[in-house]
Structure formats: C-alpha cells, structure tokens
Image (tube, helix red, strand yellow):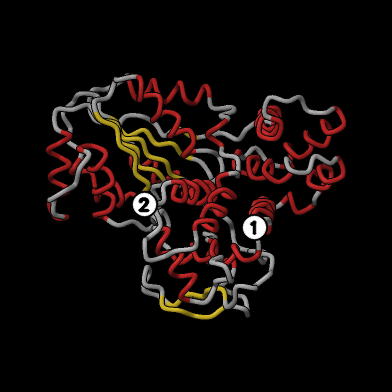
C-alpha cells in the first residue's frame, strides 16, 4: 500500500533516522527547503479511502500542543485547515441509499444469534463511508444497547483494539490492566445487544483474535466488518451473505461530483460537458470523485476540466488517484510539506499527538525563523 512515507523514501534529499514508532530505519526530508512534487508510484495504490479519512480524523482530534513545544500553533492550524478542507465523502452520500437500507435490515432482522455482516469491495468504493452511515443511524435508533467502532487495518495492536472498543463501551479505562481488557469487555457486553464495527479487516485472524470477547447471548447482536478481500468476507460468514458494493453509475458519479464542486449552486452550462467527462473517468469510485472535486472545484475553467476529462493517464486508475493526491500535497506551503511527510513515520491508524509530530520536525531542523516549521 502506498503510504505518506513512500512518497519521499527514494529521494536524494532525504536522510535515514531511527523510527521509534516502527523500530526500523526510515527516510525523512533532509531540509526544510525541499521543494519537489511527489514522484509517481507504479505499484497498485490501495487503501486510499482509509488513509485519507484516517489522517483527517486524527488531525481533527489531535490533543493540545505540548507545553514544551511553542511557536507552532499557526503551522498546526494551517495543516489541519488544509487537510480538513479536502471534501469528505460523508458530507454527500450518493448511491448508498439502497445499500444503507439493506444493511440496516440485516442488522435489525433475521437470526437472534450473533451475526457478522461484511461489507466488501475494492478500495475507494466507500466501504467505510457506508459503514459509518449505518453506524450513525443507530445514534437515534436505540435498537442496540451498545455501539463501538474500531479500525483494524493490516497491522494492528491487540491491546489497542481492545482498549478502543472497551473505552466506547464503559467510558473509562482507569485502573484496568491490559491483560484484563478482553475479559472486561466480554463481561460488559454480556446480556446486552451490541453493534461492533471492525473497519478495514485484512485477515480472518483479526476476528479470531477478538471473537471470544463478544458473547453470544442470542439477543440479536451484530458485528459489521469492512474488507477489501472477498475470501475474508466468505470465511467470516455466520448467517448473512457478504454485501458487495457496486461502482457508481455515470449519473451517480456526476451527481456526487456536482454536489462536491458546486454545493447548492447550479453547474454553469459551459462546464456541463467537461464535468460529465470528468465523472466518467472516475470509474465509479467515490473517493476518486471526491479527491478530483477538491482540485477542479478551485479552478472552474473549461480548459482545465477538459484536460482532466481527456487525460490519458486517467485510464490507469492508480495513476489518476496518485496524481490527485500529489496535487493536494503540492498546494501545501513549502515549509509545511516536510511536516506532512513526517506522518509517514507513524503506523496506519495511529493517533498522532501533535507534540510528537512537531518535535520530529524541530529535531531534524525543519524550523523557520519566527517559530514556523
């Protein structure tokens, strides 16, 4: 999977440091003045929906800056503002109405035994978005006594997953030892109808690691799993068949693109043809549509839109996705780019403390006069 760190690992303007988060040697930007676009990546780009949403969620929930690190408030706000300005899929859900209704029916009907509902599809189809929409449906609908959401990803910490779920179930982890968490979770879920979402599951082993903490009280409890692997979904099946997401139609793609670019405005007639071409070349993937909308929405020029619509590289989906992410990166101010790239040091779905990120930048010399990174 292409990660932030991969974008600069091959650059001559990097240096190796000890990565305390992964235990490996890692390339980092050599100077704060590095001014380069992201190199093209030939490998298949997967997991973009999870990486994008994970970074945005982490940055918008960052703790306050460590008292020992001063002078970085403006830079931190600038990075967060830039990334949170990337339009999210969650604001406009197009083409998921029937999917949402179907999954809600699976969760609330059928067997009283515990059941796993797997949402399966290739990266970019909106698995996490759909799961979140279903999960949020039960905020007001009190069908389930307990709800919890946890991102698993390819590499996960056994105890961190238990801690994340348990915290949502009981609200406080004070005085609970790590080794007691699995049993504590099981006891707090007993005789309760629960809904647990395990997002981005790569292997059946992830379920095997946690299943004993989910009691089977035959009260209609449900586990929702999102995965890109159809074989994983088949092996996890209890009663419900895996739910496979489809691609958006051209009309649905245009509807999503139009809503992202124009919001409540009307699309100018001169942009209509080019807009339909852009939507078609997004190949029905919501994430690609959202990313491209963030770029072309700032420059509503017919020539630019036609260029995006007719770009031959758009026939290679991974190239189109990577070019879009590169454009977002290039819009950052030069002195903020190394700060963003340092996120590649952290494991996937890691909650990055702002103080750790800023200390990394200052430790390796990425600081301008006046307190700017």
Residue under label 1, please give it: 332
Residue at image mark 2: 203
Camera sees residue 366: yes
Q: Which residue is pictured at 70% across the width and 27% down the height?
A: 251
Pick whichever, 115 or 354, lies toward us: 354
Kindly indicate the quadrant of the structure image that contains residue 293.
top right
Relative to 326, residue 182 above or below = above
Residue 78 in percent (x, y) is at 57, 53
Residue at the (23%, 37%) spot, across then down: 169
Q: Residue placed at 60% from the left, 73% from the top?
A: 32
Q: Residue at x 39, y 58 (%)?
A: 353
Give coordinates of residue 151: x percent, y percent.
37, 47
Left or right for 156, reference 277: left
Instruction: Indicate the secondary structure of the residue bearing disc 1.
Output: loop
Q: Position of residue 260 (x, y in %)?
A: 66, 34
Dot 1 surroundings within 10 Å: few (below 14), some, or many (20 or more)?
some
The answer to whether any part of residue 373 appears in the image is no
327 shown above or below 165: below
Left-right relation of 199 to 264: left
The 10 Å Cα crowd at callout 2, few under 14, some 14 to 19, many 20 or more, is some
Residue 149 lies, with reference to residue 263, above or below; the image says below
Q: CA distance from mark 2 to mark 1?
A: 36 Å
> Which image quarter holds the C terminus?
bottom right
């Amino acid at each position: 999977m292409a990660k932030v760190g991969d974008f600069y690992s091959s650059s001559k303007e990097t240096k190796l440091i000890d990565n305390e988060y992964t235990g490996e040697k890692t390339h980092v930007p050599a100077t704060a003045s590095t001014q380069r676009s992201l190199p093209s990546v030939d490998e298949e780009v997967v997991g973009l929906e999870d990486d994008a949403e994970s970074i945005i969620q982490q940055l918008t929930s960052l703790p306050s800056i460590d008292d020992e690190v001063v002078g970085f408030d403006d830079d931190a706000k600038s990075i967060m503002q830039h990334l949170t300005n990337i339009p999210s899929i969650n604001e406009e859900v197009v083409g998921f109405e029937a999917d949402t209704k179907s999954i809600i029916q699976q969760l609330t009907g059928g067997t009283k035994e515990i059941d796993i509902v797997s949402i399966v599809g290739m990266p970019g189809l909106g698995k996490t978005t759909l799961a979140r929409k279903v999960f949020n449906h039960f905020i007001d609908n009190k069908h389930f006594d307990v709800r919890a959401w946890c991102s698993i990803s390819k590499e996960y910490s056994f105890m961190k997953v238990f801690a994340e779920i348990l915290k949502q179930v009981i609200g406080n982890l004070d005085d609970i030892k790590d080794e007691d968490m699995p049993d504590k979770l099981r006891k707090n879920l007993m005789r309760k109808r629960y809904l647990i979402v395990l997002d981005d599951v790569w292997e059946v082993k992830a379920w095997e690691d946690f299943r004993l903490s989910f009691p089977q009280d035959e009260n209609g409890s449900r586990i929702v799993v999102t995965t890109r692997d159809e074989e994983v979904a088949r092996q996890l099946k209890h009663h419900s068949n895996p739910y496979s997401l489809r691609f958006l139609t051209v009309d649905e793609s245009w509807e999503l693109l139009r809503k992202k670019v124009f919001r409540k405005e009307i699309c100018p007639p001169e942009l209509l043809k080019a807009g339909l071409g852009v939507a078609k070349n997004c190949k029905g993937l919501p994430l690609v549509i959202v990313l491209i909308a963030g770029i072309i929405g700032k420059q509503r020029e017919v020539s630019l839109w036609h260029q995006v619509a007719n770009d031959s590289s758009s026939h290679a989906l991974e190239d189109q996705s990577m070019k879009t992410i590169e454009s977002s990166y290039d819009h950052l101010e030069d002195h903020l780019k190394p700060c963003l790239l340092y996120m590649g040091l952290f494991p996937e779905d890691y909650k990055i403390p702002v103080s750790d990120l800023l200390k990394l930048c200052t430790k390796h010399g990425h600081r301008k006069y006046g307190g700017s990174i």
